[in-house]
Amino acid sequence: MSSQAKSCRLADPAPLEDELPYVWRKAMRGHALNVDALAQRFGVTSAAIETFLTGSENDSMLESIAAILQLNAPAIRGLSQYRPHVPHIHAVTRLQLPFEDETVNAWLIREEDHTLLFDTGFERDSVFQLIQPLGIAEMQLFLTHDHRDHVGGIASLRSVTKKQHAMSYGQELRLGPLHIRCIDLSGHCIPTYGYIITGLTRTLCVVGDALFAGSIGGCADAFTYQMALRNLQHHVMTLPDDTILLPGHGPATTVGQEKRHNPFFAQF
């Protein structure tokens, strides 16, 4: 098992999944704009735009490009310092699993006699080897989407998977004290399933790669980009501010913090 694979408390800090250049480029793709198109708009060279996108400070250009891409400029400025904080909940564990040179999250929730796992990582055996010492005899498996870094461990979990759930949007399920509702978070991938979970001390929402702390999942084109933003606005940003969001990469966050610090959603 890779040394990258480890169990983390919900409240443990982690680096953001996306640095600023990735945020810029995701928004550019979502607006069907490339470097040359931005350069033409500003009357500068493409090299100047490339330099800016990699972190060169130019406040007037930042304001202008953020406006064109419908990103929040103050949130853009603060992104490098943004580190979300969430409370510790004993029942929730972030499984940080290896994915090539990076990592991917799976989320383990254990409450009373019920164990739920959301996504399975990339490697076949890393998730099973990580949970095996926990003595889990059976669990309920949920998937957010079928990208390879989220489904790679399914086969190794067959001996402990009581049921792999295939919920439809709007469907609700009760497992002991936990209530799970499935929501549509398609955009980054079609389909994508989010899961709102109540029954613990705080409401949780498993968002997969639809949203990261300070960013969103990359979308293939303008159509899927707008779909992703609509679904997140409707299904996630309308949840109470203290709802804890469990992304497919990077740290946990909350709805309220994303409303303040995520350039795609911040309003100040």
Image (cartoon, rainbow, N blue to C red):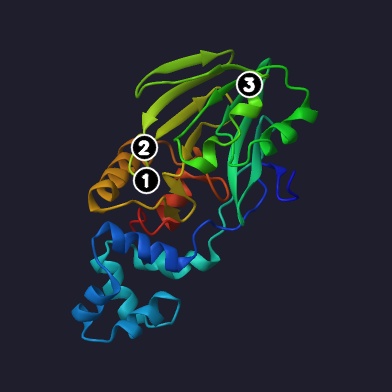
Q: Quadrant of the N terminus?
A: top right
The residue nearer to you, when weighing 11 against 121, is 121
Q: Is residue 10 visible?
A: no
Mark 1 vs 2: CB contact within 8 A:
yes
Q: Is residue 266 left or right of residue 203?
A: left
Residue 227: quadrant of the picture: top left
Q: Which residue is mark 1?
A: 188
- Against 170, residue 260 (above or below) is below
Q: Is residue 150 visible?
A: yes
Residue denoted by label 2: 185
Q: For residue 14, which quarter of the picture? A: bottom right
Q: Which residue is mark 3?
A: 158
- Classify mark 2: residues with Cα within 10 Å, few (<14), some (14-19) or many (20+): many
Q: Which one is earlier in the sequence, the residue at label 3 or at label 2?
A: 3
Q: Residue at x 39, y 53 (%)?
A: 218
Q: Indicate the amino acid at tag 2.
A: Leu
- Of the numbered discs 3 and 1, the one sitting upstream in the chain is 3
Q: CA distance from mark 3 to mark 2?
A: 27 Å
Say which element carries label 2.
loop
Instruction: Please tell me whether mark 1 sits on a helix, a strand or a loop.
Output: loop
| Residue 166 pos. (x, y %) | 44, 21
